[in-house]
Amino acid sequence: MTIKGKAYIAGIFEHPTRHAPDKSTAQLHAEVAKGAIEDAGLSKDDVDGYFCAGDAPGGAWPMVDYLGLNTKKLRHVDSTETGGCSYIIHLGHAAEAIAAGKCSIALITLAGKPRTGAMPPRAAGAEADFESAYGATTHNAYGMCAMRHMHDYGTTSEQLAWIKVAASHHAQYNPHAMLKDVVTVEDVLNSPMISDPLHRMDCCVVSDGGGALIVTTPEIAKSLKKPLVKLIGHGEAMKGPRGGKDLDLTYSAGIWSGPRAFEEAGITPKDIKYASIYDSFTITVLMQLEDLGFCKKGEGGKFVADGNLISGVGKLPFNTDGGGLCSNHPVNRGGMTKILEAVRQLRGEAHPKVQVKNCDLAIAHGTGGLLGVRHAASTAILERV
Amino acid sequence: MSEAKKYPAPVTNPETAAFWDAAKQGKFMIKRCTACGEAHYFPRAICPFCYSDKTVWEESSGEATIYTYSLMRKSPTGPYAIGYVTLKEGPSLQTNFVDCDLEKLKIGQKVKVVFKPTDGAPLPFFTPV
């Protein structure tokens, strides 16, 4: 049993807002749902599967009701919550449900407003008494990974900075990007230290916004007007400190989700023309590229340096929308926007200045949770038909 | 320095109460599985490695080395350094480094456990030897 080729992404929508104090979170979900359904050329009453994560107010049943979905038709729901990569996991789960005949038109939504106000805290896990007092945040949890990666492999701040530089080269062409200025390695190194060894420009933006996807059967996708983008491989995985045994913060769960996706797709990283890689921090990108097999473990620093991730310049164009580092990071969850830009590249709808020529194979990969503490990862491999 | 920092009291539960009772006596406890021999942290009733329920409390030496760290330059309570240390007995765990010059922390540095008070049981931290 495989989901290879059993599901297509027929509709996409990214909310143009980056700051939405005048809107409700549920409203943003509705706006992105409407956008994706219209992009596909469908109606809300066609939707028979709904997927959402922890950002959806109240969870699945209040959202299904609020969104006015057709409850006589809706027959599959999934509220898997794995932080920022939830939506990449949803994509795989939607394909599984479609392959099993459990639904035929799945809607996945993400939206929220962390730039407008504080996000509600995550529910405590069994580790709470033994960790919560130590103040793990995204910044220092990823800082701990970067510090150890530098120690073990000689990775440098200059190499990490190249990831931000590449993202900024792409963001200059995105009219919605929060940060449109092209920056240099020196700019990154001269930005204030936030949590060693990560500088401010190693960190992504905080933005309001959202995005949505329509995932459907091959038959329905072919009856619609959009260029055909199919899911050919998918993987998911989790990693934590496992009782403190053999702690190694230099790799992520992507080391398992990536090979699962590539094996299902029957391709290798060398075949990929465009990569959407979750960029909560520069170190996130570097570690994911290694874990996914774009280079050997420990060689990510050399791989990302000298513009290798810049479209039209390097060998692996990445995050051509400017990514989380420059464009947006809706709800502090980067998985959705990773899929959206990968689909735009495969459709040929990316900005002409960053569009990859003959882009027929793309990867969208993300993590959720804290890389240096406990996290999930998910990998999707997409093909233009 | 973070001496003035107020830390939250552990909530505790039946599975971990013995850890906090020992902490009140200044003892830093880990769990060891008598079936597979592996030590682990934070403490569980069921061994996370072999799923045996034959886990027992063991006092740790409190001696450890820094696996990694990150110095958070700003926070509402001032700068602080989070990290992981690897205990002499094997398990690695998350902590903060206290009572030291945070700028001088280094991976591989030897540290030892030190307890800081809360309104409930004290919390374990680590400080350079």
Image: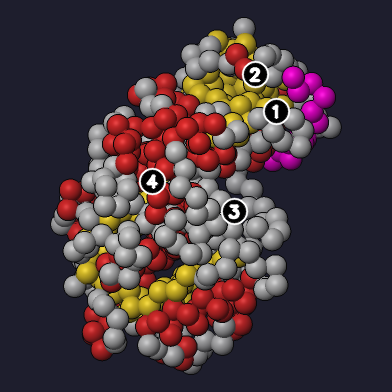
Q: Secondary structure at mark 1?
A: loop
Q: From the viewer's perspective, tell me whether residue A341 is left or right of residue B128.
A: left
In the foreground, A211 or A49: A211
Q: From the viewer's perspective, tell me whether residue A358 is left or right of residue A146.
A: left
Q: Which residue is mark 3?
A: A206
| First of labels 4, 3 by sequence position | 4
Q: Mark 1 and mark 4, same subunit?
A: no
Q: Which residue is mark 4?
A: A166
The numbered mark at residue B79 is 1
Q: From the viewer's perspective, tell me whether residue A222 is left or right of residue A351.
A: left
Amino acid at the residue labelled 1: Pro
Percent of width and height locating residue A144: 51, 30
Percent of width and height locating residue A30: 56, 79
> What is the distance, in whole Å, between disc 2 and disc 4 at their CAs?
33 Å
Structural crowding at the residue carrying mark 2, measured as other residues with C-alpha within 10 Å and reported as few (<14), some (14–19) or many (≥20): many
> What is the distance, in whole Å, between disc 2 and disc 3 at their CAs?
28 Å
Relative to A117, residue B107 above or below: above
